[in-house]
Amino acid sequence: MHLLLVEDDERLARALTRLLEEDRHIVEHAPDGRTGLELASALDGLDVVILDLGLPDMSGLDVARRLRTDGIDVAILMLTARDTVSDRVTGLDAGADDYVVKPFAYAEVAARLRALGRRAEPGPRRSEPRLSAGAITLDEASRRVTVHGRNVDLSPREFSLLEALLRHAGQALSRDQLLDHAWPFSVAVTPNAVDAYVHYLRTKLGEAGAQIETVRGIGYRLSDG
Ligand code: CA
């Protein structure tokens, strides 16, 4: 997808851009609202604007409203530091299609982008928001995980971790790669956190937990069962 990231936090913008580009998106970056608006109207074929709510020159809400009044019909994914119902409603009223609450992990942004992409796809052959390997199935849209059809209750971090493993099933992922995908940006964690969460995840998945294999000296790999 062709993306425009409007975000003034340089470190977050750099980290997010790197991961999005690794997922083969084309990413343009604007450090403030005015530049964001200019780029959004100048760029052809933009799929999604990832829009920070707190920008130095104007609010992300104003940027979203301006895009809509200017008739720019691009999907908007809002990045917000607040998570109250009224903020969400205001964001959606201003023209945003979806939102992610800070601090967020890359996996959450990636999932929202895929959902926005599916919405834009015409016709009945939409891609499935469902990932599975062996006995494990993860539904991105409903955020439900099942093992042999039985519901498993996961924390958001466990969910993102499992999602990263499922998305790369059969591949060894390093602890750093798992941190990149499943942990919030700018939160200080050590790779040991990955080991702890893999342990929780294996326990909650029951017998299917054995599908998460330890790859010595590297990290973890999810097998097909
Ligand atoms: Ca900001």
Image (cartoon, helix red, strand yellow):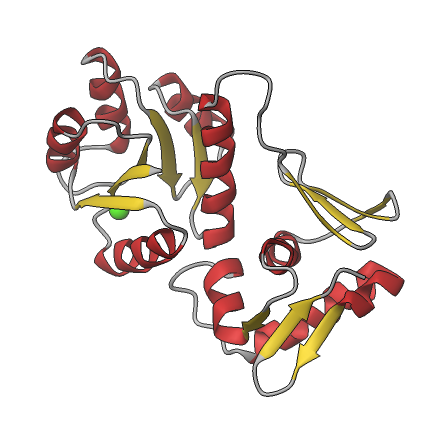
In this view, which residue lies farthest toward the bottom?
217
Task: Count the labels in the image.
Answer: 0
- Nearer to us in this view, 9 or 113: 113
Q: In this view, does 1 lie to the left or right of 164?
A: left
Q: Which of 200 and 84 is in front in this view?
A: 200
| Residue 129 rendering spot, x and y as whole percentages | 62, 36
Residue located at (29% from left, 17% from top): 73
Q: Is residue 188 left or right of residue 45?
A: right
Point 89% across, 64% down: residue: 207
Relative to 98, say whether 158 is above or below.
below
- Location of the C terminus by quadrant is bottom right
Looking at the image, residue 125 sits to the left or right of residue 205; the answer is left
Quarter of image, res 75: top left
Q: In this view, does 159 lie above or below 4?
A: below
Q: Report whether residue 52 is seen.
A: no
The x, y position of residue 43, in whole percent, is: 16, 30
Name the residue: 37% across, 34% down. 78
Q: Along the horizontal axis of the image, is 99 left or right of 210?
A: left
Residue 214 location, quadrant: bottom right
Report x, y in % for residue 209: 80, 65
> Is there any visible trace of residue 14 in the rendered image?
yes
